[in-house]
Image (cartoon, rainbow, N blue to C red):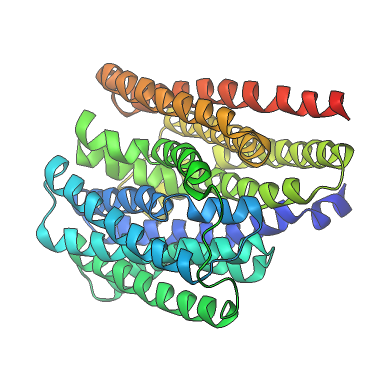
Amino acid sequence: MLKAFVNSPALRVATAFGVGGAAFSIGNLLLARQLSAEAYGLVSLIIGLVSLAVVIAPLGIDLVITRRGLELGRYLRRITLATSLLTSVATVIVGAVLYRLHASLLICLLVTIAAGGVSQAASAHFQSLRQFSVSVPILQSPNWGVVLAGAATTAAAATTAIFSCAILAASGLATSVGAWILLVRRTSGANPYGKPAGLWREAIPLVAVTAASSTFLQLERLVIPAALNIDDLATFGVLAALVGSPFRILQAAVGFTIIPRLRDAESIEARNQLLKREGLLMIIVILAGSVLIWMLAPYLAHLLLAGRYDLSNSLVVATVIAGVLKVFSAFATAVASALAPARNLRILSIGSWACVAIATFASFAAARWGLLGVLYAISAGWLIRCFIASWLSLPHLRQDLTSA
């Protein structure tokens, strides 16, 4: 079993993601300790909007690259730049209209999302080539941007969200420039003008599924300010840092490694062995991690934040349940994204967005029970999505086995 853990690419990447996730948690705790609840809540909202928009910014080009094993040539790079900028502008409009964000925060939002879309595409290029040692640091750079923002905010004794968000924007821009330079140098001879056949027919369903997943992941940060208040969002930010972060790491690692490995599996038997092995390892890690988190999170919150945020056992349990459902959903969705035909991807996309709508509606209905009610309402949406993704992926595997 120990050898299986060591040899598992998903868990090796999860370890690398774990370091980045620890940085994300530390950065959030520094921000929560230094800033007022209102200011930290605004930073949490910006993080949520950025996290959602960045995965949408390449409009699925990054997903097609990973799915097909392509390189990000000159033509695709130009498209990625344009779509990232358009996505950042659209998100700024949403931030201004729905959340009435200050102009300075909107500028930070614009820069961070445009830069993040570029980095996302560059990371996908190296992921497709299974160069995880290059891809993972690029993808994890936003987590280090958060810890940098937390450290800088603490050192400067800053009290506004604007200062922290400006650090996030600057670090994201620096990462995207470095990733883009590395990408251009390594793809100078890679099909500079060619457009892959059926690019948008495949990219749009994929990005729709991913956008639904990302929206789901950030739904608490997007719904809580409207259904409850900014102070509750600050509390959730602490929950996400101490309780949700390990599940977020595992979820990202599962999708990151399984898709290219399923694509490259030489036989149906190898594909199913891969899923069984990785699934068992994920379950073991989830069970052990859930117990440890439940025991330590309230104590750490009280100790590290000087009693400003006391996490009840009920909130911790609700966040753990949500995290487990997110990991299971990521596993089933990764299988469908790697193996399912375009028709099933469209079904998964529609079903995922339906789950987002159900969870959003349920969140407002459950707001009378406070933050705990909102967390369980969103978890109900994740549970439904798990069933949908499994229903689409498992029969596909059985069909492959029969035809073999």
Residue 92 seen in this snapshot: yes
Query: Which residue is at 25% across, 59% downward?
Result: 109
Residue 107 position by quadrant: bottom left
Left-right relation of 188 to 44: right
Left-right relation of 240 to 1: left
Query: Which residue is at 53% across, 34% downward?
Result: 320
Seen from the viewer's position, the closer of residues 198 and 41 is 198
Q: Position of residue 48 (x, y in %)?
A: 34, 48
Seen from the viewer's position, the closer of residues 222 and 60 is 60
Q: Position of residue 63 (x, y in %)?
A: 54, 51
Number of numbered callouts drawn = 0
Quadrant of the snapshot with the C terminus = top right
Residue 160 seen in this snapshot: no
Q: Position of residue 206 (x, y in %)?
A: 51, 41
Residue 104 position by quadrant: bottom left
Query: Which residue is at 87% across, 42% downward?
Result: 267
Seen from the viewer's position, the closer of residues 169 and 58 is 58
Query: Which residue is at 46% across, 67% downward?
Result: 75
Residue 149 position by quadrant: bottom left
- Vertically, is 341 above or below 83? above
- Vertically, is 275 above or below 304? above
Q: Position of residue 69 (x, y in %)?
A: 66, 58
Left-right relation of 171 to 40: right
